[in-house]
Amino acid sequence: MYLEIDGSAGEGGGQILRTSLAMSILLGKPIRIKNIRIGRQKPGLQAQHLTGVNALAKITNAEVKGASLGSQELQFIPKSIQSGEYKFDVSDIKASAGSVSLIFQAILLPLALSGAVSKVAILGGTHVLWSPSIHYFQTVYIPIISRMGIKTDIKLITWGWYPKGGGRIEAEINPANLKNIDLTQRGMLKSIKCVSTVSNLPISIAQRQIDQASSVFRSKNIEADFEVINVPSRGPGTGTFISVEFENSLAGFSSLGDIGKKAEEVANEACEDCLKFLESGMAIEEHLADQLVPLMALAKGNSRFTTSKISLHLLTNIQVAEQFLPIKFSVFGEKDHPGEVSVDGIGFGI
């Protein structure tokens, strides 16, 4: 009997697919997802989504129907999770800069809860629009989820910018026992670090980005450290990444360059997002909030956080988790405003 998932619900993006597949695998529930990304400019499964589906099918020896480019319906019947060594390449589906971060996130929970060590290599885009960069994973996401018992390490081997991709990450995922987390108070600010990067472009672009970021923070009397780096990649690219460390929490903000987009604008975007978060007083930013939902739902005990924005992504991921599990998230605050989220997890595997 399939659990029916509406892929157009809430935010209606690939997040519904990733969370549903992970829950399906861990709970052993066959699923049928309809209306996958139906409201997007390119609806259905795109290269990165299909790579994630195929990766999870391989890891679990799943029976799958509808796993093709553009497909808006998918049936997935998981079997047992097989830890081991894996390599997944977005270009096996289609030459693109599909996000390696989102593919990694799709396979992380099943492999972490498989009971054995796995090693994974993923090729594609490492710093692309509409997805967390590997910088974000390394400095924010992975350190935070390590507090919940997820022990993994990611190495950025080769950078991959949109549209050429070609980046590579390698990760080791260790057996995990999920535990709850409290991220309601961020504590005192410890540091702000800003990194400006270019590949196959004049280093002056990265310097302009860092100069602008420095000017923005100085105008607010905020101390920060700055670094310019030039990295090899298959294609050109540039971006600014800001990481913020508090006593009890972490946050990250990024902006990518584009044709016709001034270096100063790239820096301003990341800085503005960072400043808004600092002013909110909340413990975590909106992007980390929705990514923690599946872990909180599966962990033992009460988990909670305060976030600078209750986003539609967050509410959608909560809705998906509640479809699979006998839990109820408490959300205090209005959509698109700061708020607090809590849940009593099921204690998966305990």
Image: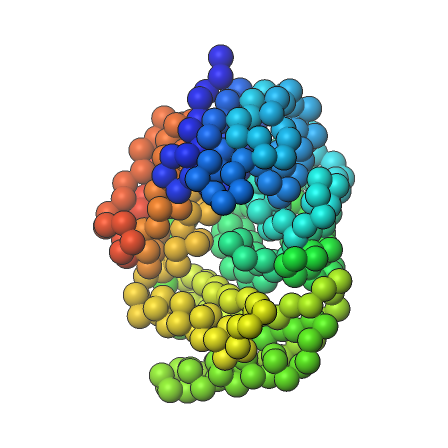
Q: Residue at x 59, y 20 (%)?
A: 77
Colouring rule applied to residues: rainbow
Figure disc tally:
0
Answer yes or no: is residue 155 visible: no
The quadrant where residue 158 appears: bottom right
Check the image and report above or below for 215 versus 52: below
**Picture coordinates of residue 214, whole percent (x, y):** 48, 84
Residue 311 point in image, percent of width and height:
35, 50
Query: In the image, is residue 73 above or below residue 134?
Result: above
In the foreground, 18 or 245: 18
Instruction: State the residue at coordinates (34%, 68%).
Output: 276
Locate residue 301 relative to residue 65 in the image: left or right: left
Q: Tell whether 219 sits left or right of 83.
A: left
Q: Determine which quarter of the picture holds residue 52.
A: top right
Instruction: Report the residue at 69% width, 24% height from top.
Output: 61
**What x and y, as percent, mark residue 22?**
54, 33
- Camera-nearest residue between 43 and 135: 43
Residue 112: x and y in percent read: 60, 39
Does residue 74 appear anywhere in the picture? Answer: yes
Identity of the residue drawn at 49% across and 26% down? 33
Seen from the viewer's position, the closer of residues 116 and 172 is 172
78 with respect to 266 (left or right): right
